Each structure stands twice: as structure tokens, then as C-alpha cells.
């Protein structure tokens, strides 16, 4: 529903960010997490919505790292 309310990308990203990965819209990432030392649960899946309308550089950078498998096998850092 939200995406139907936006006809096109609502603003221009400054030119200095053109060489960076940009997400102009929204994307969903399913992140599978293995939980150590918990007898009640082994795995879970987080569904992450990336909002490129409000944060196109941050969302684009995160998605680029996901696509390049940067987070595969990484322990969650607090």
C-alpha cells in the first residue's frame, strides 16, 4: 500500500553519492540467524524492510553488502 502512494522517487540524491549503491524504493531482506546456547530455539528468521525512500544511501549500502554475502557467518555484534 505504501509503495502505491509514491509515484516516483521523491527527491534527488546529492551527486556526491552517485558512485555509491543507492536503493530508490523499498526492499525486504530475510536474515536467517542461528542462536547459540539456547535450548528453546536454534534458528530464526528476521524480516528486514529497507527504506530507500527515506535513507537511499544507507539502505543501498546495506543491500549491497547483503548481496555480496558480507554478513554470511558473521556473529551478531551488540
Image (spheres, rainbow, N blue to C red):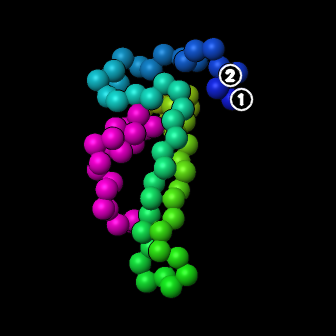
Which residue in the structure is indicated by mark 2?
4
- Quadrant in the picture for residue 20: top left
| Residue 70 placement, left or right of 76 | left
Picture residue at 44% right of the left edge, 63% below the top: 33
Which residue in the structure is indicated by mark 1?
1
The image shows residue 11 at horizontal and vertical percentages of: 54, 17
- Quadrant in the picture for residue 68: top left
Q: Secondary structure at mark 2?
A: helix
For disc 1, the neighbor class at 10 Å (few under 14, some 14 to 19, many from 20) is few
For disc 2, the neighbor class at 10 Å (few under 14, some 14 to 19, many from 20) is few
The image shows residue 2 at horizontal and vertical percentages of: 69, 29
The image shows residue 15 at horizontal and vertical percentages of: 36, 17
Picture residue at 30% right of the left edge, 62% below the top: 73
For the image, the number of numbered tags is: 2
The image shows residue 8 at horizontal and vertical percentages of: 58, 15
Question: Is the Cβ of the residue at disc 2 closer than 8 Å to that at disc 1?
Answer: yes
Q: Which residues are magenta?
A: 58-78
Picture quarter with the N terminus: top right
Q: Above or below — where is 77 with respect to 40?
A: above
Is 74 within the magenta? yes
Picture quarter with the C terminus: bottom left
Q: Above or below — where is 19 with respect to 48?
A: above
Q: Is residue 1 or residue 60 the one in the foreground? A: 1
Picture residue at 51% right of the left edge, 35% below the top: 27
Q: CA distance from mark 2 to mark 1?
A: 5 Å
Picture residue at 39% right of the left edge, 65% below the top: 76
| Residue 8 placement, left or right of 38 | right
Is 36 within the magenta? no
Q: Is residue 22 or residue 29 the one in the foreground? A: 29
Q: Above or below — where is 13 with respect to 77?
A: above
Amino acid at each position: 500500500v505504501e509503495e502505491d502512494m509514491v509515484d516516483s522517487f521523491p527527491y534527488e540524491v546529492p551527486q556526491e553519492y552517485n558512485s555509491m549503491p543507492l536503493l530508490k524504493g523499498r526492499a525486504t531482506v530475510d536474515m536467517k540467524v542461528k542462536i547459540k546456547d539456547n535450548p528453546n530455539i536454534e534458528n530464526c528468521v528476521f524480516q528486514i524492510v529497507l527504506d530507500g525512500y527515506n535513507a537511499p544511501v544507507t539502505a543501498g549500502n546495506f543491500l549491497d553488502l547483503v548481496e555480496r554475502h558480507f554478513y554470511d557467518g558473521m556473529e551478531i555484534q551488540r
